[in-house]
Amino acid sequence: MSEEDGMDDWAAAMAEQADAESESEGGDDGVRVAELDELSDDAPITQEEKKKLDTILDIPVTISMEVGRSQISIRNLLQLNQGSVVELDRVAGEPLDVLVNGTLIAHGEVVVVNDKFGIRLTDVISQIERIKKLR
């Protein structure tokens, strides 16, 4: 098989694909475009919803920052001692997960402020999304 024959086969395949695409564009093959309602995150909160929110705003919650996770056997867990290293499922430099009562609400990075560790939030889930997760 010569190089010209290979190019002819390629050209024929491309022409065949172009013909198939033009037929599907012009013909009615039963395909319809789906009509979807627009989603809106800017829906106003009603007065009743504000009252419900006010009742929970002073409830204490537990916030935690997760560097990573690892699964180990009980045998390996019992062998851990001072100086042991446990490999985590994250790469150095990846953002930490910020969890509130076990629910992911943001990502962040570790900072030191006045000799104490803190976290700078780099990506926060929107309030509307967090409220939807509460329901």
Image (spheres, helix red, strand yellow):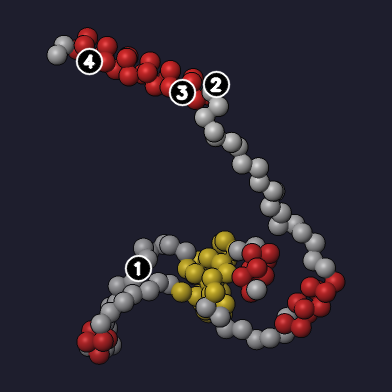
> Badges 3 and 4: C-beta atoms under 8 Å apart?
no
User: Which residue occupies the foreground of this view, 1 or 68?
Assistant: 1
Marks 3 and 2: which is nearer the front? 2
Marks 3 and 4: which is nearer the front? 3
Q: Which residue is mark 2?
A: 26
Gap between marks 3 and 4, in whole Å? Answer: 23 Å
Q: Quadrant of residue 126?
A: bottom right
Marks 4 and 2: which is nearer the front? 2
Gap between marks 2 and 1, in whole Å? Answer: 51 Å
Of the residues under marks 2 and 1, which one precedes in the sequence? 2
The type of residue carrying mark 2 is Gly
Q: Which residue is mark 4?
A: 6
The type of residue carrying mark 1 is Asp
Label 4's element?
A: helix
Marks 1 and 3: which is nearer the front? 3
Say the numbered circle drawn on residue 8.
none
The type of residue carrying mark 4 is Gly
The type of residue carrying mark 3 is Glu
Q: Residue furthest right?
A: 47
Q: Which residue is mark 3?
A: 21
Q: Residues within 10 Å of mark 3 (few under 14, many from 20)?
A: few
